[in-house]
Image (cartoon, rainbow, N blue to C red):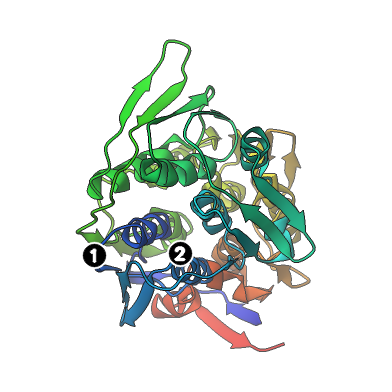
């Protein structure tokens, strides 16, 4: 799908969509419990639909009621976990499937099946479990055993979350040690908060060498009572970005006490507005594309801690550099550093590509609303915010959707 933009000024109020980060975790906590729980509000994004499919594979029934889902545990299980393009879904559910003695299979997009899984591959090798990549996806078989689990802190926090959900259900205590440097710590904090809401006990400490250690007793039962999903800072960053490009937009529905790491975007925006600045993305890689876009049309920006942008839905640094170049904005992409040089954006001579990445599509939309132009592969936003272009239209942005 193509979206054609007319130069426009954004003005109005928009409610932040439900947090995808919180929704994934609450749906899993509900599925691991004993009683029905209503989780919502939910966005019917591709990622959340993938998690709902995998919740069903765990054996929970799902009843959709408007923008909410009633999760009822202890139904009929399935052997296939369809993850679509959701890295969170894949890495959260792999340890849960390892709780079983029978074989399960994970499917998803080719890009998703290329995502690194070294933490789980090492774990399965050590415990003599099956984890095998095949042409059709990933084969896996447990049962997972208790023990001491060691994870490097500079890989995805999604591995930590997956294990933290699985370990309380084992017979016996386990220890999960995350060695420094620990990146994406806010995502681990969100997971810990959901475990608290579900009545799961654990001991958490930070050791002198910087290691983060969880001691998790076994034989626990999930008892989630409140499935309320808070607003999403990651997606709210995009309409809020119009305030730095001449618009006047108010974003509502965001908790000031949220543990979401991307809540820092407001402080990042203040830095960008003030002048050239350096921003560390070690804990907030999803903000990379929008910060690159804004840095290019403001005062320039240097982003550090960018290595993990290469293994997202696209190689985000390279993708954004290519598309920013069409606006006349120059970038320099290094191994763990990206520099964006300021320029007055021009209307692209050719269509902007989404690279099948929702964050790239939304970041490019901020600039296209300034210059006009076309976005190709615009449907990539369905991964996290299917209503994105409707929201832009409600703010007065001229957008016309065309099927290719």
Which is more toward the observer, 162 or 389?
162
On residue 206, which mark appears?
Answer: none
Which residue is denoted by mark 1 in the rendering?
35
Please report the residue visible at 52 percent of the width from the left and 45 percent of the height from the top: 158
Task: Please state if 63 lies on the left or on the right of 375 as rendered.
Answer: left
Quadrant in which the N terminus is drawn: bottom right
Which is more toward the observer, 240 or 93?
93
Task: Please state if 100 lies on the left or on the right of 66 as rendered.
Answer: right
x then y, percent, for residue 303? 60, 36
> Are circles 1 and 2 on residues that touch, CB within 8 Å?
no
Q: Secondary structure at mark 2?
A: helix
Q: Residue furthest left?
A: 225
Q: Secondary structure at mark 1?
A: loop
Quadrant in which the C terminus is drawn: bottom right
Vertical arrangement, residue 293 with respect to residue 206, above or below: below
| The quadrant where residue 228 appears | bottom left
x then y, percent, for residue 67? 32, 77
| The quadrant where residue 11 appears | bottom left
x then y, percent, for residue 354? 68, 66
Q: CA distance from mark 1 to mark 2?
A: 15 Å
Vertical arrangement, residue 395 with respect to residue 362, above or below: below
Q: Is residue 269 visible?
A: no
Which residue is denoted by mark 2 in the rendering?
58
Q: Dot 2, how many residues are within 10 Å of its Cα: few (below 14), some (14-19), or many (20+)?
A: many
Q: Dot 1, how many residues are within 10 Å of its Cα: few (below 14), some (14-19), or many (20+)?
A: some
Which is more toward the observer, 359 or 74?
74
């Amino acid at each position: 799908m193509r979206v054609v933009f007319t130069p426009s000024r954004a003005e109005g109020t928009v409610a932040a969509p439900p947090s995808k980060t919180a929704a994934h975790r609450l749906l899993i906590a509900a599925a691991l419990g004993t009683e029905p729980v209503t989780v919502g509000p939910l966005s019917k994004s591709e990622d959340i639909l993938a998690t709902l499919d995998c919740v069903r594979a765990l054996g929970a029934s799902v009843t959709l009621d408007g923008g909410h889902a009633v999760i009822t545990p202890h139904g009929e299980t399935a052997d296939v976990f369809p993850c679509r393009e959701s890295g969170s879904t894949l890495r959260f559910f792999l340890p849960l499937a390892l709780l079983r003695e029978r074989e399960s299979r994970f499917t998803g997009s080719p890009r998703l099946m290329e995502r690194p899984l070294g933490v789980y591959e090492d774990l399965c090798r050590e415990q003599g479990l099956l984890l095998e990549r095949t042409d059709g996806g990933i084969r896996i078989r447990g049962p997972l055993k208790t023990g001491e689990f060691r994870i490097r802190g500079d890989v995805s926090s999604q591995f930590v979350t997956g294990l933290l959900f699985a370990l309380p259900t084992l017979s016996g205590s386990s220890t999960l040690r995350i060695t420094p440097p620990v990146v994406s710590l806010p995502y681990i904090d969100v997971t810990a908060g959901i475990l608290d809401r579900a009545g799961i006990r654990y001991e958490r400490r930070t050791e002198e060498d910087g290691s983060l250690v969880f001691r998790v007793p076994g034989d626990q039962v999930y008892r989630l009572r409140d499935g309320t999903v808070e607003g999403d800072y990651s997606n709210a960053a995009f309409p809020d970005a119009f305030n730095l490009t001449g618009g006047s937009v108010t974003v509502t529905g965001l908790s000031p006490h949220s543990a979401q790491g991307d809540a820092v975007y407001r402080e990042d925006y203040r830095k960008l507005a003030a002048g050239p600045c350096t921003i560390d993305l070690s804990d907030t890689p999803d903000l990379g594309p929008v910060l690159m876009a804004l840095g290019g049309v403001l005062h320039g920006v240097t982003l550090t801690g960018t290595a993990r942008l290469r293994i997202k839905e696209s190689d985000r640094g390279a993708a954004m550099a290519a598309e920013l170049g069409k606006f006349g904005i120059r970038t320099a992409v290094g191994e763990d550093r990206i520099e964006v040089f300021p320029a007055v954006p021009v209307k692209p001579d050719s269509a902007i590509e989404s690279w099948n990445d929702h964050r790239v599509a939304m970041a490019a939309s901020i600039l296209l609303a300034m210059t006009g132009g076309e976005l190709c592969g615009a449907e990539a936003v369905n991964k996290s915010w299917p209503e994105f272009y409707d929201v832009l239209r409600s703010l007065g942005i001229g957008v016309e959707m065309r099927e290719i």
